[in-house]
Image (cartoon, rainbow, N blue to C red):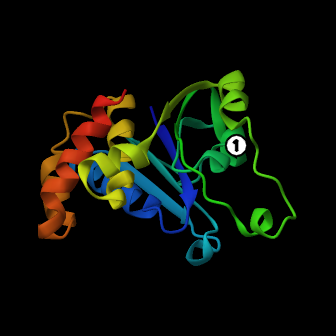
Amino acid sequence: MTKSILLVGVGGQGTILASKLLTTGLMEAGFDVKMSEIHGMSQRGGSVSSQVRYGEKVESPVIELGGADILVSFEKMEALRYLNYLKPDGKVVVNDYEIYSMPILSGKADYPENAFEILQSKAKTIVINGAKVAEALGNSKVMNVILLGTIIKAMGLEDINWDKILRDNIKPKLVELNLKALKVGMNLL
């Protein structure tokens, strides 16, 4: 059975790196894995999404509307933007973090004040404060690996050798910090 994970965020949050680490781990565990990325205007704070599908045999990297088992959002508004991709019984993990996009900064759109209430009314939603947790670890840039840890836990992927995946794919001087971030993320669920 194929599982589908949708990671969404804003350019610069590390969404793509998290999805690449996830994909690498799944492949090393023997799954057939397909991944697709949409960068949008990622360099300018635009929407970024990454779709990871894995199982015994995966035909397509694309998650259809209503097809994601889990939606992991690095930013609150992005969770709302992609909510229609979630299965009726799917889970949302949303980071309590706001980045204002150009339409909001220019006054052409409003940031939704009640994002969590909307999400919780439509799906099983877990809210975490990845930025606060990352800062407690000493580096705000590990927020993406904290969120990766929540995916691993939510999808039951703890048996994969994530220490090896991080050691093989992260700069050596940042490995220990990222290993801590991953464990903390896994313990948030």
Secondary structure beneath label 1 = helix
Q: Residue at position x 54%, y 48% from top? A: 97
Q: Residue at position x 37%, y 37% from top? A: 150
Between 95 and 20, the one lying in front of the other is 95
Residue bearing the label numbered 1: 80
> Does 101 appear above or below 122?
below
x then y, percent, for residue 189? 37, 26
x then y, percent, for residue 48? 58, 62
Q: Residue at position x 13%, y 68% from top? A: 173
Q: Quadrant of the N terminus?
A: top left
x then y, percent, for residue 174? 18, 64
Can residue 64 be seen in this snapshot? no
Left or right: 12 in relation to 21: right
Q: Report the number of numbered marks.
A: 1
Question: Dividing the picture into quarters, in which one does residue 31 lie?
Answer: top left
Residue at the far bottom in the pictured view? 43
Can residue 27 be seen in this snapshot? yes
Mark 1 crowd level (few <14, some 14–19, many ≥20, 10 Å Cα) = some
Left or right: 25 in relation to 72: left
Residue at the far right in the pictured view? 108
